[in-house]
Amino acid sequence: MPPLTKSQASEIEEYDYFVIGGGSGGLASARRAASYGAKVGLAEATPKLGGTCVNVGCVPKSRSDPILITEWLSWEAY
């Protein structure tokens, strides 16, 4: 189903499930709820869905931990 316009969305008085934030987690949550038949609404502050990691880029946690440890060790060395 395509996104609703603001005027169309304002006509809906009640949602079963409402998600704030169209990042990866918000989109997954909204899709899952809709797959169970819930009437889902989603609000996103920016024009693009997907969140920071999709639209800007991020370092996955599994990659950031060694980086942080290395940085901490370099500070301790001085």
Image (cartoon, rainbow, N blue to C red):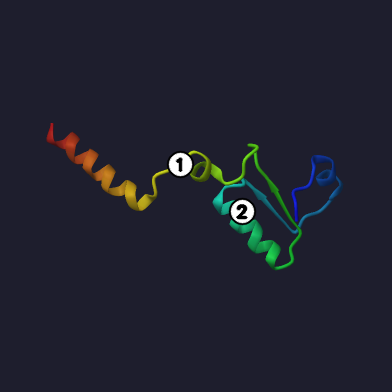
Name the residue at 26% across, 48% down. 66
Image location (x, y in percent) of residue 25: 56, 53
- Identified at 64% across, 63% down, the residue is 32
| The C terminus sits in image quarter | top left
Mark 1 or mark 2, earlier in chain = 2
Q: Are marks 1 and 2 in contact (CB under 8 Å)?
A: no
Q: Which residue is mark 2?
A: 27
Residue type, label 2: Leu
* x and y percentages locating residue 13 in the rendered image: 84, 50
Disc number for residue 57:
1
Crowd rating for badge 2 (residues with CA inside 10 Å; few <14, some 14–19, many 20+)? some
Residue at the spot x=59%, y=57% of the render? 28
Q: Is residue 47 left or right of residue 66?
A: right
Q: Which of label 1 and label 2 is nearer to you? A: 1
Which numbered circle lies on residue 14? none
Residue kind at label 1, given as amino acid type: Gly
x 61%, y 53%: residue: 27
Left/right of residue 75 with respect to residue 31 in the rendered view: left
Give residue 7's quadrant in the image: top right
The kind of secondary structure element at disc 1 is loop
Disc 2 secondary structure class: helix
